[in-house]
Each structure stands twice: as structure tokens, then as C-alpha cells.
């Protein structure tokens, strides 16, 4: 390859799309889980407060109830710890907001604290990779609490309500473990099998990357699931089979894809886990107690105190001065502050809506932030119309108000996986109806303030994203390139070692390739940064996937389709071109 072919290219601002960000996608296969969880977690405290005649306290219980939106893709052991952390983080942010609100009524101070909390929450959620809905829920609660009337003596009781509702949310989200202990692992493995089927049916860089990412996610889910069980052992073998199926073979593609989809459907279902294909000859070694895929050693390493301390240090480094997450946090701080002060200067009574609007925009890069700006603005404006339509119904009785909030909470989670703007159509009336728990407000005032806050928050938020550069995104790509090269070398060295060591090395290489692609995609959508080594990334991906192909553990003969055509081969994946 000539030097000219790998010359870095400076990213330039690209034309921003207007239609593509608004297209509807397929709903998530687990959309109903957060939707039902948040309804159950909210109904218990809200109906209790309704019976006590204290619906004015709903804002504090809702803070804890909204924690039920997190962690639904995690195995139950990890989910329990993650949700406990979310509840504590929610309570800490709410506590800071309530204490500030009880000590000062200065709008300038309140907006500054709101912007600072939003930036801290954004950085924390990005560093821990908590997943959707990310920092937006935390910022919504803390920003709203900043502008709620508060006295210092009320703070402990209000935080107690939040913790109590958070405990209910924890029970709602972790309770299903008593019925289907390995449910999250089964869904993760089913996704890996389905992605492998797509790869077999339609070979190409896009499906190859998607399959590698799904297999990696399935391994990570099994790794975090706790002690091994017979079901998890079977799931491990199914993931290994999906991983092997991604690589070229002499099996007929149509038959192989159909068989993988059948395994995925059985794995996702409620019946027994399907019997995995038998291992290949190179895997059949040792005694029945010998682990085949090296995952037990990784589980043991995760429990090691030294490994945990190293993980905590790595988390702190990810928030340090050289972190690529820092510019995004600075964008959040500046954008939220600018939005809040701009609305306050125009006399808007609730600038926290502008703060939340700005905070919700910030994604991994400027291009994705623009997409979210369009989605948020359209969804909020349509949601205001929905609010105007349902407001008379919600004012007929307190129970009607509670039921309307529960309905929109369910609808938001049911729709948001299709597209963010569609979910925002339901989120907006729910957020506006929360104000009705304290006392009725003039409808015209609420609608006018929300429209103005949405527009100003979106403008200020995107302006901050465009002006605050993130030149560290390219540095993340360079570090990912180095990590991928090291992982590929280790995988090649492990080719002649026992299958467990080879499997661990291959998983490390897959993880590095997933990180490399994520880093490259993030940097590609960023403006005003140094040159990107695009050709080096493509070359590293090609070499990495060739190594994965060369070191693959093939399924045994019984795993192959009977109609496989002997003597035919599938070409190695070409990552550089579609």
C-alpha cells in the first residue's frame, strides 16, 4: 500500500441531514420491559400518595421511580448493583439541587448549579457506559428540583421519599430474576445468533461488524452474569457457535442462516435452551469439567481485588484532563448554562426546561448531536399539542391525572426505540403534567414557556456543541489502533495454545475491534479536529478480522447443514469496501 493511500484526512464540516434523523426504525425487542417497569415503579408511590392526599410530593417519588428505566440489558447480578448506583446518583443530584434551592432564590446561581450538575451527570454516565436513557433523566430531575420551592428542613424527608421510590424501582427491575434467572443472557445470545445469521445471509463489512459487536456483547453479558449454571454453559457454547459461524465456511449460506435464526428464536423463547452444536475435534479435549472458552478465568479475574482497583483507576482516568469525554462535558456545561441564562433574560419562568433540552442534545459527536437536536425539537413541539389535548381530561379528577402520567410514561418507552422524536411526543406531556400535581397552571402559560424553552435550549445547545471542539477524538482512535495491534499479536501467538487461551485472546481482539470502530465512527462525526488515520483504521480492521478467521474454532461436523456444498469457500471479509 502506498504512502498516499494512508495519508490522514482532516475532517470537514459535512452537510447536516434533515430527513434521515427523523426516519422511524424497528422497535427494540425488549421495548416493553422498561415501559412496564417504569409504570409499575411509578404506580405504587403515586397511588399511595393519592390515597394520602399528598400528590404534591410526586416530584420526589418520581425521581426514584424513573430509575426503573436503567439496566434492562444487564444480567440480574450486574443489574442489581447498577440500579443501586443509579438510585444513589439520582438521590445525590436531587439532594444537591434541593439544598441549593433552599439556600438561594437567585436565578443566576440556580442556572449555574443546574449546568454544572448536567455536565457532571453527562461525564459520569459516559464514563460508566450506563446506556440509555443516560444522563437525561438525572438532569431532568435535578434541574426541575432547583426551581421548586424548598426549605432546608424539608430536604431529608423529600430525599427519603426518593430513596423509598428507588427501592420500589429496584425491586421491580430485579424481581424477574426469581422467574427467569438467565433471561438477559438468553436475549443477548439470541441477538448474537441473529446477527451471525444476517452475516451469513449477506456477507459484507456492515453485517460483519454488527455480528462481531453482538457476539462481543453476548460474551460480556455472560461474563457479568455470576456463577456458571448449566443454562449459562449451554449459552456459552451457543455464543461460540455464533462466533464461528461468522467466519467463512463451506456450509450453504441459506441453510446456515435459517438454522442460526431458528436457534435464536429458541434461545429467546421461554422453553429450554436449544442443544448447542457439538464441538469440533480441536475443542474435544480434557475432562468434562475442563472449560472450553476460558470465561471462568475471566470471571475469577473480575472478582480479584487488584483487578477491581485497576478498573476503578481506569474509570477515574477516563474522567481526567486528557479524557475525550471532557470536551463533551464542557459542551454540556456551556450549552446548558447559555440556554438557562438566555431564557431567564427573556423572562421565562421555568428556565430548567431549556437546561434539560440542551443537556438532552449532547451525543458522542457533533453530527449525532445535530440529529438529536432535530428529534428533540420536533418531538417537544408535537408533544405540546398532545398536552393541550389531554389537559382537560387530566383535570377531571386526581386519579385521572395519575393515570395520564402513567400512560405517557409507558408510551414514551414504547415509542422511543422507534425514534427519539416519537418518544419525545409522549415525554413532553408527561413532564408538563407533573407540574399539575402541585397546583393547576394556566395552560397558555405552560405551552408558551415550553415552546420557547425548547427552541432556545436547542439553539444554545447545538451552538455550544459546534463551537467547543473535541480534538481528542482522534487521539482515542490512535490509542484504539495501538490496542488492536497488540490484541492481534496476542491472538496470533495464542493460535497454538489450548482452546481456552485461544478463546480469551480472540475475545480480547474482538473487543479491541469493536472499540476501534466506535472510536472511528465517533471521530468521523466530529468537527474541527486533527487528521484521522482512516486508511490505517480500515487496514487494522481487515487484519484483525483475518486473524479472527484464521484462529476460529470451527463447529463439529454435526453442526453443519447436510446440504453444504463441499469444496466451496466463502471469501474472507473485506472491511474496506461495501
Image (tube, rainbow, N blue to C red):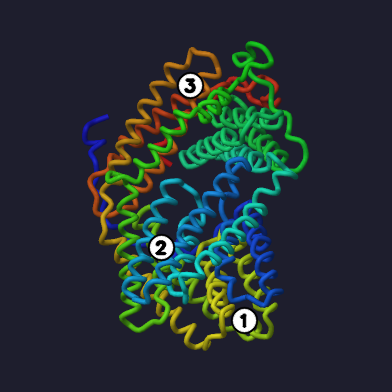
Q: Residue at x 47, y 23 (%)?
A: 505
Residue bearing the label numbered 3: 550
Residue 214's disc number: none
Residue bearing the label numbered 2: 361
Front position in the image: 577 or 40: 40
Number of the front mark, 3 or 1: 1
| Secondary element type, mark 1 | helix
Residue bearing the label numbered 1: 390
Q: Quadrant of residue 394?
A: bottom right
Q: Is residue 519 above or below residue 505?
A: below
Real-space CA distance between mark 1 and mark 2, rounded to the nearest whole angstrom: 27 Å
Real-space CA distance between mark 3 and mark 1, rounded to the nearest whole angstrom: 61 Å
Extreme top residue here?
A: 286
Which quadrant, please, contains the C terminus? top left
Percent coordinates x, y for residue 93 in the rendering: 45, 60
Q: Earlier in the sequence, mark 1 or mark 2?
A: 2
Q: Residue at x 36, y 25 (%)?
A: 486
The 10 Å Cα crowd at callout 2, few under 14, some 14 to 19, many 20 or more, is many
Can I make out residue 468 in this image? yes
Q: Is residue 506 left or right of residue 525?
A: right
Query: Answer yes or no: do the residues labelled 1 and 2 have beta carbons within 8 Å?
Result: no
Extreme right residue here?
A: 271
Q: Is residue 100 left or right of residue 84?
A: left
Q: Is residue 355 above or below residue 446?
A: above
Real-space CA distance between mark 2 and mark 3, rounded to the nearest whole angstrom: 42 Å
Amino acid at each position: 500500500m502506498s504512502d498516499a493511500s494512508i495519508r490522514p484526512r482532516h475532517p470537514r464540516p459535512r452537510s447536516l441531514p434533515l430527513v434521515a434523523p427523523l426516519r422511524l426504525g424497528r422497535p427494540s425487542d425488549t421495548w416493553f420491559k422498561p415501559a412496564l417497569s417504569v409504570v409499575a415503579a411509578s404506580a405504587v408511590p403515586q397511588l399511595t400518595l393519592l390515597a394520602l392526599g399528598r400528590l404534591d410530593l410526586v416530584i420526589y417519588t418520581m425521581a426514584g421511580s424513573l430509575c426503573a428505566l436503567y439496566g434492562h440489558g444487564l444480567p440480574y447480578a450486574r443489574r442489581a448493583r447498577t440500579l443501586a448506583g443509579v438510585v444513589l446518583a439520582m438521590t445525590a443530584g436531587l439532594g444537591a439541587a434541593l439544598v441549593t434551592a433552599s439556600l438561594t432564590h437567585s436565578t443566576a446561581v440556580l442556572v449555574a448549579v443546574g449546568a454544572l450538575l448536567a455536565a457532571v451527570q453527562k461525564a459520569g454516565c459516559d464514563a460508566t457506559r450506563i446506556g440509555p436513557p443516560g444522563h437525561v433523566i438525572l438532569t431532568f430531575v435535578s434541574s426541575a428540583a432547583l426551581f421548586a420551592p424548598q426549605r432546608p428542613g424539608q430536604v431529608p424527608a423529600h430525599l427519603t421519599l426518593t430513596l423509598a421510590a428507588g427501592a420500589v424501582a429496584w425491586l421491580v427491575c430485579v424481581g424477574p430474576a426469581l422467574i427467569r434467572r438467565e433471561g438477559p443472557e438468553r436475549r443477548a445470545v439470541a441477538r448474537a445468533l441473529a446477527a451471525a445469521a444476517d452475516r451469513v445471509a449477506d456477507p459484507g463489512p456492515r453485517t460483519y461488524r454488527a455480528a462481531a459487536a453482538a457476539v462481543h456483547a453476548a460474551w460480556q453479558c455472560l461474563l457479568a452474569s455470576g456463577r456458571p449454571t448449566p443454562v449459562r454453559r449451554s449459552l456459552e457454547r451457543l455464543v461460540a457457535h455464533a462466533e464461528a459461524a461468522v467466519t467463512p465456511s463451506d456450509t450453504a449460506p441459506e441453510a446456515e442462516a435459517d438454522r442460526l435464526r431458528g436457534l435464536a428464536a429458541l434461545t429467546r423463547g421461554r422453553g429450554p435452551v436449544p442443544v448447542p452444536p457439538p464441538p469440533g475435534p480441536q475443542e474435544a479435549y480434557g475432562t468434562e469439567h475442563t472449560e472450553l472458552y476460558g470465561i471462568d478465568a475471566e470471571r475469577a479475574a473480575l472478582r480479584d481485588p487488584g483487578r477491581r482497583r485497576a478498573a476503578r483507576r481506569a474509570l477515574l482516568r477516563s474522567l481526567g484532563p486528557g479524557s475525550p469525554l471532557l470536551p463533551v462535558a464542557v459542551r454540556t456545561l456551556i450549552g446548558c448554562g447559555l440556554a438557562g441564562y438566555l431564557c431567564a433574560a427573556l423572562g421565562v419562568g421555568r428556565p430548567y426546561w431549556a437546561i434539560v433540552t440542551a443537556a438532552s442534545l449532547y451525543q458522542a459527536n457533533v453530527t449525532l448531536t445535530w440529529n438529536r437536536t432535530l428529534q428533540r425539537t420536533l418531538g417537544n413541539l408535537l408533544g405540546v399539542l398532545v398536552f393541550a389535548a389531554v389537559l382537560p381530561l387530566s383535570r377531571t379528577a386526581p386519579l385521572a391525572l395519575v393515570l395520564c402520567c402513567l400512560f405517557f410514561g409507558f408510551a414514551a418507552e414504547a415509542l422511543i426505540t422507534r425514534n427519539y422524536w416519537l418518544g419525545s411526543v409522549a415525554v413532553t406531556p408527561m413532564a408538563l403534567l407533573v407540574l399539575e400535581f402541585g397546583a393547576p397552571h394556566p395552560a397558555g402559560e405552560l405551552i408558551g414557556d415550553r415552546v420557547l424553552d425548547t427552541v432556545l435550549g436547542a439553539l444554545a445547545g447545538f451552538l455550544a456543541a459546534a463551537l467547543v471542539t473535541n480534538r481528542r477524538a482522534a487521539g482515542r482512535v490512535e490509542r484504539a489502533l495501538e490496542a488492536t495491534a497488540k490484541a492481534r499479536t496476542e491472538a496470533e501467538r495464542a493460535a497454538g495454545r489450548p482452546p481456552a487461551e485461544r478463546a480469551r485472546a480472540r475475545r480480547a481482539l474482538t473487543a479491541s475491534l469493536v472499540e476501534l470502530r466506535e472510536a472511528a465512527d465517533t471521530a468521523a462525526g466530529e468537527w474541527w479536529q486533527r487528521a484521522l488515520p482512516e486508511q490505517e483504521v480500515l487496514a487494522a480492521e481487515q487484519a484483525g478480522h483475518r486473524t479472527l478467521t484464521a484462529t476460529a474454532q470451527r463447529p463439529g461436523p454435526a453442526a453443519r447443514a447436510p446440504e453444504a456444498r463441499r469444496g466451496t469457500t466463502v471469501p474472507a471479509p473485506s472491511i474496506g469496501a461495501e
